[in-house]
Amino acid sequence: MLSVTSIPAFNDNYIWLLKNDDNHCVVVDPGDATPVLEALNNEGLELDGILVTHHHNDHIGGIRTLLEHFPALSIYGPATDRFPMVNHPLKHGQSFTLFNTDFTVFHVPGHTLDHIAYYAEGMLFCGDTLFSAGCGRLFEGLPKQMHQSLTHLASLPDDTLVFCAHEYTLSNLKFALAVEPNNTALNEYVVEAKALREKNIPTLPSSIGKEKCINPFLRAHIDSVKAAVSQGATDSTDTETFAALRRWKDEF
Ligand code: ZN
Ligand code: FE
C-alpha cells in the first residue's frame, strides 16, 4: 500500500513523500533537499525517485543535492527543455507505474505553460495549479488555459485527495468568503481550517468534492460567483468569470 505524508519546507511548501511497504519512497517537488534527507534518515527510507510538477525553484531546488546522495534516481517531469535533470519526460495522457500504482499525467497549463499534475486512483498531486480554496497565479498561461486545466481536475472523482504544494488555505479562504459570503459549506470549512492551523496541522490534502463546494476558482459557472465579479450580472461566460476572479485575487 502506498502511503503519503508531508514534509514541510520553506514557509508554506509541502514536499509530499510517497512510500510503499518496504521502505522505498519518492518525493514530489523537493524544493529543498535538507528536510527530505532528514525525513529519509528519521524513517530509514531509501529514495527511488522524484516527481516534478513545474520548474519554479521552490519545487526543484533540492534535486541536485538529492541526486548527489542517490545517483540512480528516477526523475519524472514535464517533457520540455526546462528540465535537463528529468530522465522520465512526460506528456499529457502518459502513464507510468510506481510502487504497483498507476499514475497518469495531465498537462495543466496556467501557472506555468508546461506544468503537469500526477493522478493515481484516489490522489492528485497538482503542484501550484489547484490549491485548497484557490489556484496558482497565472505567471505564464492565459485565464482560459488555467480555467480549462482546473475544469479538467474538477472532473476527477469527488473522493480524490488533492495534494497541493502550498499551505495557502487560510488566506485563500479570506478571498473565497469575499466572493461567496453566504456559501454554507465555505463558512463551515473556514472554522475547520482555522482549528487545524491553530494546532499547526496541515489543511491538506483536500478533496475534489470539497473544492467543488468551496473553491471560487472551480465555481465560475455558479450564478452567485458570476454575480460577485460583475456587480450582480450573471451573463458573463465561465472563462470571463474565472479571469475576473483571478484579477480580483491578484489585488486582494
Ligand atoms: Zn510555482
Ligand atoms: Fe510554488
Image: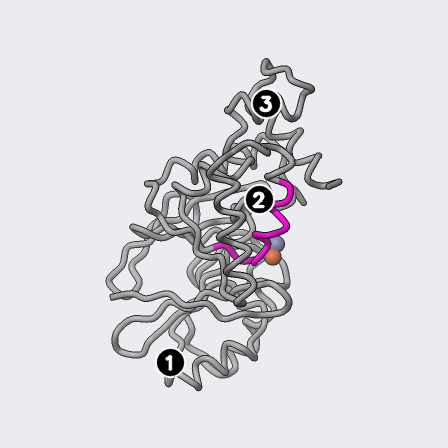
Q: Which of 27 and 88 is in front in this view?
A: 27
In reply to whether residue 132 is colored magenta, the answer given is no
Mark 2 vs 3, N-terminal side: 2
- Residue 232 screen position, x and y as percent: 65, 17
Mark 1 vs 3, N-terminal side: 1
Give the residues in magenta.
Answer: 164-175
Query: Compared to 207, does 6 lie above or below?
Result: below
Q: Residue 226 carries which label?
A: 3
Badge 2 is on which residue? 135
Badge 1 is on which residue? 46
Q: Nearer the viewer, residue 137 or 81?
A: 137
Mark 3, secondary structure of its residue: helix
Give the Cα distance between marks 1 and 3.
Answer: 49 Å
Mark 2, secondary structure of its residue: strand
Q: Which residue is drawn at 60% across and 63% down?
A: 12
The C terminus lies in quadrant: top right
Look at discs 1 and 2 and give the one toward the viewer. 2
For label 1, count other residues whose C-alpha is less than 10 Å away and answer few (under 14), some (14-19) or many (20+).
some
Give the Cα distance between marks 2 and 3.
Answer: 17 Å
Three-letter amino acid code of the residue under disc 2: Cys
Q: Residue at x 56, y 57 (%)?
A: 166
- Residue 221 screen position, x and y as percent: 51, 24
**Where, by quadrant of the figure, is residue 35 drawn?**
bottom right
